Amino acid sequence: MDVKPLRTAQEYERAVARIEELFDAQAGSLAFDELEVLGALVDAYETRHFPQGVR
C-alpha cells in the first residue's frame, strides 16, 4: 500500500475505485487496514475540494 495525500482528481478516483474493491474486507486484515486509510484520505480530499452538503 502506497500511502500519500490525494492531490489530484485522478488520484482521488483511483482511491475510490480501490475502496470499492476492498469494501467487503475482513476486519483486522491488511485489506481492511488499507480500506480504513483510503477512507480517511478520500474524506480529507472531499473536505478540501467539495463544498459541504454536496458529498
Image (cartoon, rainbow, N blue to C red):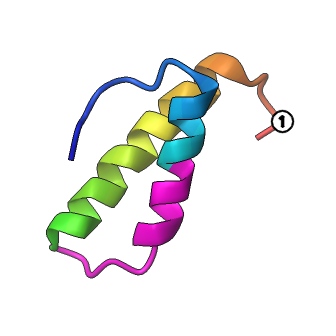
- Expressed as whole percent of the image width and height from the top left, the position of residue 24 reads 42, 80
Number of numbered discs overlaid on the protein picture: 1
Mark 1 neighbour class, 10 Å CA radius: few under 14, some 14 to 19, many 20 or more: few
Residue at the spot 55% in from the left edge and 56% down from the top edge: 17
Q: Which residues are magenta?
A: 16-28
Above or below 14: residue 29? below
Q: Is residue 49 left or right of residue 3?
A: right
- Expressed as whole percent of the image width and height from the top left, the position of residue 9 reads 63, 27
Q: Is residue 24 left or right of residue 27?
A: right
Residues 3 and 28: in front is 3
- In this view, the residue farthest toward the right is 54
Q: Is residue 24 magenta?
A: yes
Residues 47 and 38: in front is 38
- Residue 3 figure quarter: top left
- Expressed as whole percent of the image width and height from the top left, the position of residue 48 reads 61, 18
Residue at the spot 82% in from the left edge and 35% down from the top edge: 53
Q: Is residue 24 left or right of residue 13?
A: left
Residue at the spot 74% in from the left edge and 24% down from the top edge: 50
- Expressed as whole percent of the image width and height from the top left, the position of residue 38 reads 38, 46
Going by the numbered disc 1, the residue's amino acid type is Val
Q: Is residue 12 left or right of residue 39?
A: right
Quarter of the picture containing the C terminus is top right
Q: Is residue 23 magenta?
A: yes
Above or below 9: residue 30? below
Pointer 1: what residue?
54
Mark 1 element type: loop
Residue at the spot 58% in from the left edge and 31% down from the top edge: 10
Residues 55 and 15: in front is 15
Above or below 31: residue 33? above
- Residue 13 figure quarter: top right
